[in-house]
Amino acid sequence: MLSIKNLTASINGTPVLKGIDLEIKAGEIHAIMGPNGSGKSTLGKVLVGHPAYEVTGGVVLFEGQDLFGLEADARARAGLFMGFQHPIEVPGVSNAAFLRLAYNKKAEAEGRDELDPLEFDDFIKEKIRLVAMREEFLDRSLNEGFSGGEKKRNEILQMAVLEPKLAILDELDSGLDIDALRVLGEAVNRLMRPDRALLIITHFPRILETLRPQFVHVLSGGRILKRGGPELAVELEERGYDWVLEEASAGRGV
Amino acid sequence: MTAGVESGPLSELLASARPGGWEALRDAAESRLAHRDADLAPLGGRTLRTAPPAIPPPASADAQPYVHPEMMATRQVFVNGFHASHASCATALPAGVRFFPISTASEACRLLGTLGEGAPDLFEDLNSARFTEGAVILVPQNLRVGIPLHLLFLNHAPAAGEGSLPAVFPRVLVALDRGAELELVEEHHGEGAYLSCPVVEIRVGEGAVLRHERIQREGAEAFHFGALRAEVAQGGQYHSRTLSFGARVSRQRPRLHLAEGAEASLDGLALLGGTQVADTQSFIHHAAPHATSRQLHKCVVDGQARAIFNGSIRVAPGAQQTDAHQQSRNLLLSATAKVDTRPQLEIYADDVKCSHGAAVGQLDPDELFYLQSRGLSPEDARNLLTYGFAADLLARIPVASLRRSLRHLVLARTQAASLGDLA
């Protein structure tokens, strides 16, 4: 589904990704872990086309298509989604109106029927149950005045509405209490299907108890230093990141 | 008109003890006008004289498109400066509330011309010297009016021609007695070339609350120069929102006087395109301690339009514990659009919390990207954000049908209508 080969990127001329290779197949759940400032979020933002980053090398294919040949909005309509760590507030635009617009733009691109406000009302009620969001949040302005946890809930609601093929979730657990994390983790699991994939970006392994990745990659300094299975996440939980970094600097890394 | 008004400021208002109350006001305004040049001001290449002609009354006027279901029977309609009794309907007013044409009020509406502070400008003087019609709204002590009142001014003038501009001078007086509460919607609509010079005077009594929505949708060739004076007594609240969409050139000149513990908000939105000019000159006077004011002024400026904001806040000596916050936020949609913003704080007390800020710019790239990352094209994202920037000020309009119609107007004016029904 996603094939990343030797991806390099920079921000304001400073290299931040220094040769990333990653293969994600349909049905797989991958986790990118690493210390703060390692380039984890950067990788996600580069994939979804954030304008602050410049891709300086490498090839990324999404469903066989050159990802960097598509604008950010076209990537989204092609089925790529990123749940952001710090979602933006948009005053004046109601959450419900925005969600319906986003849904309809994607439906239009896929040649499906658009939903009118009444149809969307039924559709969205089912989705907000999935993420246990109170209905009043639909009438409020998009993310405006939402707490950190409410914003994350709203990101997963958007994911549920857009049903992406590949969802990248950046630090889903930050700002969430344990109950909310469990609810959202389970919601993400229920959105997972054999023809979809997940890329979880996280500093803390806690989220991986709910979202169980088959593949774990440790990213630091813009490079993937170590790869493993779920057992690597457990080891990181116990030992932290320092040993991976030391191993890598001693030349024994991946 | 004094029957049924027993005591308090209302009886003072309507006291017959000082006949000629209006005349004194007119004389003062007239003498100030006499010291100005005969041709008062050039308005878009046309001149305004001290005695502009009235717009002729139209054969018939259809107010129906402007009527809101929530205010069906609490409305007074004025067409070309004349009270349109056939289009008005005030049968749903709660007992005790007075809402009537100013021409039927006592000659001694003594409050007129006495509220607020600071010298009237040319247009306010013109109004004081020339007004013949308008509305008076009186709410007695502790009466909470549960239904909004609608004040509708419609103007139908001929298209631009030769000679002096015809003009209308609506005058409005609103007085809330102690503890009263009211929601008032004031709308100005029109077509053709004319000058509209409304003056609104407001007294909010102790602990009283007035929520005031003001909508300016004058015709594209029209000029609108409005003045508003509000005095808010101890613990009273005055909350207003002024939305400027129409007129070739418009100016809003609100002046607020806040007594101890008063609360005020004075929000504004100007949505401009073409060669429109909209000017806001506001003044909020914290005259006594513990008063709070909030001011958010937004302009969305496209084409070669120009927005001006001069927002002044004065904290008087001794007005300790003042809490004043002012923000001017402006969105430029074209390279030729222009915004001049000048927030000003004048503080003569030392224990206060005051802040102000001004921002002029384009849309936030992070917001644009966020919407694009959800599949909206760059153009759709821009239009949606522009809509949101303006519609933000509409969210708390209490009258649902009005809120909805204004959202549709903003959708259309921000090219966001293609995004479907967001209202």
Image: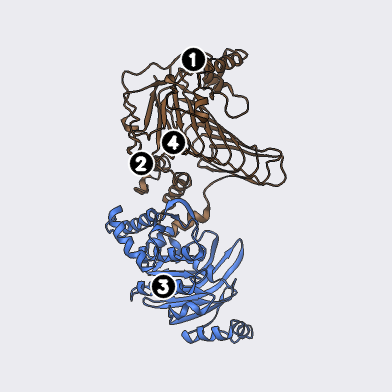
Which residue is denoted by mark 1 in the rendering? B52
Does the CB distance between marks 1 and 4 fall below 8 Å?
no
Q: In this rendering, is residue B382 above or below B13? A: below
Residue A29 falls in image quadrant: bottom left
Measure the alpha-carbon separation of dots 1 and 4: 29 Å
Q: Is residue B179 visible?
A: yes
Rounded to the nearest whole Å, what is the CA distance between mark 2 and mark 1?
36 Å
User: Element under label 2?
Assistant: helix
Q: Amino acid at mark 1?
A: Pro
Q: CA distance from mark 3 to mark 4?
A: 45 Å
Q: Name the disc covering residue B184, or none.
A: 4
Mark whose residue sits in front, 1 or 4: 4
Q: Callout 2 environment at 10 Å: few (<14), some (14 to 19), or many (20+)?
A: some
| Sequence-earlier tag: 1 or 4 | 1
Q: Establish whether labels 1 and 4 are both on one chain.
A: yes
B347 to the left or right of B401: right
According to the picture, the residue beneath numbered tag 3 turns out to be: A183
> Where in the figure is residue A92, as x and y percent of width and height?
45, 49
Q: CA distance from mark 3 to mark 2?
A: 38 Å
Q: Chain of mark 2?
A: B
Residue under numbered circle 2? B401
Q: CA distance from mark 3 to mark 1?
A: 69 Å
